Image (cartoon, helix red, strand yellow):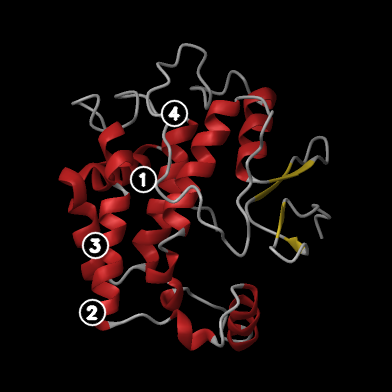
Amino acid sequence: GLNCPATRKLDDGSDFYTLPMLRDPDSGTVVGDSFDIANYLEDKFPDSGGYLFPSDSTRNGLDYESPNRDTVFPAPLTTNEGSRNEAYARFNTNVDATFTAYTILVGQFLPFNPETAEATKAMMAKRAHLRSWDDVCVKGEAREQIKVAFEKALTSLAELFMVHEDGPYLEGTRANYADLIVGGWLNMLSVTMPEEEWKDFRLWHGGVFGRLHDALQENYFKCCD
């Protein structure tokens, strides 16, 4: 194994192991948590082309505050308070709060390994303090109400992507770490939301999230077998 220490804790104090993890084959360094990985890569490969934390950033959007920032989650969000590039860390935490609050919309569609699916569902239900995995399945009018609330919760974040008319990124035509954090959530929704719901989601708020997703997929996303 990678022997990467847990980067988060569950609300009962137990370790919560997350992805992604990075192992540098040159040094053997193992890093967990996407924010720590971004800082490591910025230090390790400063001349790789583009910057995750550009020194000449306009900092558009980094003061974003989630309407769900005070929500208590079974796996409390990482704050990375006092870290390098702390403004990006705060943005990261606030974006995670907004999207995490509505993961109930896609939980039932998560792609599990068939061999371990039932055990995984039972473990996740226990962590979330649910009676069973069936509580994750939201349908009908209840689902429609959650989608309406989700669209509303995304309003202030969407507005930040409208500052530069040409977009599609927070700073216009150049992406940084903040765009990638939102993009990570969009990538997850694109493969877990029912197809018609994802099509509708892409059009919310004038289509800013659909454009961001497409641009990141075209310019930055690479899937390696």
**Label 3: few (<14), some (14–19) or many (≥20) C-alpha neighbours in 10 Å:** few
Assign a secondary structure to mark 3.
helix
Give me the residue at 30% from left, 82% from top: 139
Residue 151 image-quadrant placement: bottom left
Give me the residue at 63% from left, 52% from top: 20
| Label 4 vs 1, first from the N-terminus | 4
**Label 1: few (<14), some (14–19) or many (≥20) C-alpha neighbours in 10 Å:** few
What's the residue type where badge 1 is placed? Gln
- Would residue 8 be found to the left or right of residue 162 on screen? right
Residue 194 image-quadrant placement: bottom left
Mark 3 highlights which residue? 148
Q: Position of residue 209 (x, y in %)?
A: 28, 46
Mark 1 highlights which residue? 217
Q: Position of residue 59 (x, y in %)?
A: 43, 20
What's the residue type where badge 3 is placed? Val
Mark 2 highlights which residue? 141
Give me the residue at 29% from left, 75% from top: 143
What's the residue type where badge 4 is placed? Asp
What's the residue type where badge 2 is placed? Glu
Q: Position of residue 126 (x, y in %)?
A: 64, 79
- Would residue 192 be found to the left or right of residue 140 on screen? right
**Label 4: few (<14), some (14–19) or many (≥20) C-alpha neighbours in 10 Å:** few
| Label 4 vs 3, first from the N-terminus | 4
| Label 4 vs 2, first from the N-terminus | 4
Q: CA distance from mark 1 to mark 3?
A: 26 Å
Q: CA distance from mark 4 to mark 1?
A: 25 Å
Determine whether 86 is above or below 2 in the image. above
Task: Point out the image quarter for the C terminus.
Answer: bottom right
